[in-house]
Image (cartoon, rainbow, N blue to C red):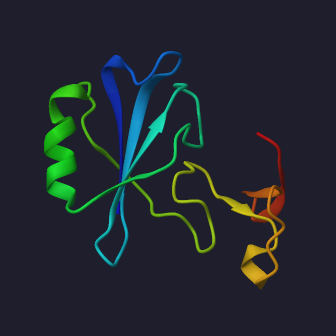
């Protein structure tokens, strides 16, 4: 389960980065992660995931910060794809057990092609 939300007011998370949108992702095992995106058009998170104990707590913590669109349900990532990516992105070769770390690919018109963010 994943939910996307845009912030009412950008959140200054450190001296140089500002968060504009967030994604909450709950794995089937129950772990809950929060991803920060420091560009409104970003398709991958700017910051690593933050782990929480329960989904309700994360949603409650952020409810007052999100804009009028509210929490937007988005599809879970495809198998072997990045949990924080809003489009299908995976490490090249991960699907066959031979990951090429640092090389990414994305699904375009049903075909996996190189992805260079």
Q: How many labels sit on residues?
A: 0
Drawn side of residue 85 relative to residue 20, left or right: right
Decide: is 88 above or below 92: above
Q: Residue at x 35, y 76 (%)?
A: 28
Decide: is 44 above or below 15: below
Q: Residue furthest front?
A: 15
Decide: is 75 above or below 34: below
Q: Residue at x 17, y 35 (%)?
A: 63
Percent position (x, y) of residue 17? 51, 21
Percent position (x, y) of residue 102? 81, 55
Quarter of the image where one finds residue 96: bottom right
Q: Residue furthest bottom?
A: 97
Decide: is 19 above or below 87: above
Drawn side of residue 24 relative to residue 85, left or right: left
Percent position (x, y) of residue 106? 74, 56
Q: Residue at x 79, y 73 (%)?
A: 99
- Closest to the observer, 103 or 4: 103
- Closest to the observer, 68 or 82: 82
- Closest to the observer, 17 or 62: 17
Which quadrant holds the N terminus? bottom left
Which quadrant holds the C terminus? top right
Q: Residue at x 37, y 70 (%)?
A: 27
């Amino acid at each position: 389960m994943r939910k996307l939300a845009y912030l009412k007011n950008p959140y200054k998370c450190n001296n140089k980065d500002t968060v504009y949108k967030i994604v909450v992702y709950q794995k089937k095992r129950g772990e809950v992660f929060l991803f920060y995106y420091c560009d409104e058009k970003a398709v991958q998170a700017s910051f690593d995931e933050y782990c929480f104990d329960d989904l309700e707590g994360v949603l409650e913590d952020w409810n007052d910060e999100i804009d009028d669109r509210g929490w937007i349900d988005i599809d879970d990532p495809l198998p072997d794809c990045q949990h924080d990516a809003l489009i299908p992105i995976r490490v090249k070769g991960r699907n066959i057990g031979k990951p090429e770390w640092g090389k990414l690919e994305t699904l375009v018109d049903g075909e996996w092609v190189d992805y260079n963010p």
